[in-house]
Amino acid sequence: MKLPFTSSIPQARTQLLRSLQQAFRLAVVANEPGAPSADELAEMATSQTRRDFLTNTAKMGLLVSAGGLLSACDTEVVEPALEPQRQQSLGSLTG
């Protein structure tokens, strides 16, 4: 849910500045006459939009799958055992 603060200030590009803008918006809303209670303001500040939720869920899925890929690359390769006849024939070829 967006805060009821209309301004010509563009959206910040970094997370730090976005947080500062959000804190400023909350301060402006809290100082208006007939402002919502502190609990409602806290809920407004911590609520997540659908887009943010989907983005964070996709990021978590990528992290989990990347972790699975990294652990799969770390496994040892098991060589199949050669048959005894074949080992002897290979041994005679090498020396």
Image (spheres, grey):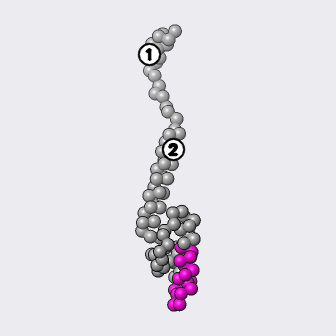
Residue on which disc 2 sits: 70
Residue at screen point 52% across, 35% down: 76
Residue on which disc 1 sits: 85
Q: Does the magenta stretch include residue 88?
A: no
Which residue range is magenta in the image?
A: 22-39
Could you say which is closer to the camera, residue 55 or residue 32?
A: 32
Residue at screen point 46% across, 22% down: 82
- The residue type indicated by label 2 comes to Leu
How many circles with numbers are drawn on the protein? 2
- The residue type indicated by label 1 comes to Gln
76 lies left or right of 50: right
Q: Is residue 51 above or below residue 8?
A: above
Q: Is residue 94 above or below residue 17?
A: above
Q: In this view, does 61 lie above or below 15?
A: above
Task: Give the dominant element type of the magenta stretch: helix, strand or loop.
Answer: helix
Task: Determine the secondary structure under disc 1.
Answer: helix
